[in-house]
Amino acid sequence: MANKRVLVKFSGEALAGEAGHGIDTKILKYIAQEIKSLVDAGIEVGIVIGGGNIIRGVTAAQDGIIKRTSGDYMGMLATVINGVAMQEACEHAGLQVRMQTAIKMEQIAEPYINRRAVRHLEKGRVVIFAAGTGNPFFTTDTAATLRAVEIGAEVIIKATKVDGVYDKDPEKFRDAIKLSELTYEQALKDHIKVMDDTSIALAKDNKLPIIVCDMSKKGNLLDILNGNRENCSIVQ
Ligand code: UDP
């Protein structure tokens, strides 16, 4: 096993399923099983989930009634809602799991404490990091990269709807070419945009490889971590 500790990032939208919003328990169950396959293989797993299926700060603030900072806090709270749901699904799948939040809400989850998170991981518990970075004007991609670096993950996996990074939008251009390996500089280019600039810069500074893969392909996460790089792209 090449990667012993990983951070997996799912977008909030991934949880929405066909409805396009809210939380689809079938998807939660599927993700929990995918995570379980990693834990069963001895991999320590941290998870960050976005909040886009519920609300995003930019969208909440678009007509000027809700301030951007308030919208962002609403977005961070949305990640906690998703985190609670993911925690339940992981437990349902038989996993041990703890959630930690970047904004204290101790009736719901532990506060984020790095050393405690690492201890949970060492004990084989899945750790869900919720409430983003705790700061407005950031994204959960940045939160995921930050936590990945903090817990010493060997890699961050961005689990998406596509099987990797393309030189142009594969949904618009039939001749789009998949880039199986790219540099952080390439990943920062506008037409590629694997993640937002802040998260890529953080990954680059800390030499954290980013894997982009299709989360809907069963067994993909484990396969990739076992070294099969066919169904993904890697930024390093
Ligand atoms: N957010 C924030 N700070 C953070 C992380 C998230 O303010 O550190 C807010 C922001 O408004 C964002 C929302 O939470 O739009 C949901 O996160 P994101 O858009 O990254 O979710 P995803 O697109 O992955 O579902």
Image (cartoon, rainbow, N blue to C red):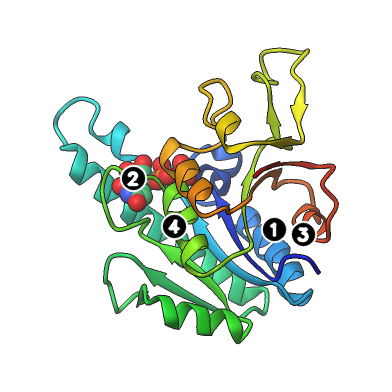
Q: Do the residues labelled 1 and 3 touch (CB within 8 Å)?
A: no
For the residue carrying disc 4, how many other residues have a C-alpha within 10 Å: few (<14), some (14-19), or many (20+)?
some
Amino acid on which the number 4 mark rests in the picture: Leu
Q: Residue 139 carries which label?
A: none
Give the Cα separation between the discs numbered 4 and 3.
20 Å
Q: Which of marks 2 and 1 is nearer the N terminus?
A: 1
Tally of numbered discs: 4
Amino acid on which the number 1 mark rests in the picture: Tyr
Give the Cα separation between the discs numbered 2 and 3.
28 Å
**x, y percentage for residue 209?**
63, 51
Query: Is the CB of the residue bearing disc 2 within 8 angstroms of ligand 1?
Result: yes
Kindly state the secondary structure of the residue where label 4 is placed: helix
Amino acid on which the number 2 mark rests in the picture: Phe
Query: Is the CB of the residue bearing disc 4 within 8 angstroms of ligand 1?
Result: no
- Residue drawn at x 36%, y 72% is 112
Foreground: disc 4 or disc 2 = 4
Give the Cα separation between the discs numbered 4 and 1.
26 Å
Residue 75 visible to an observer of this rendering: no
Q: Which mark is residue 225?
A: 3
Residue under label 1:
30
Between 109 and 17, which is closer to the camera in this rendering? 109
Q: Which of marks 2 and 3 is nearer the N terminus?
A: 2
Q: Which mark is residue 138?
A: 2
Q: In which quarter of the image is the N terminus?
A: bottom right
Q: Are marks 4 and 2 in contact (CB under 8 Å)?
A: no
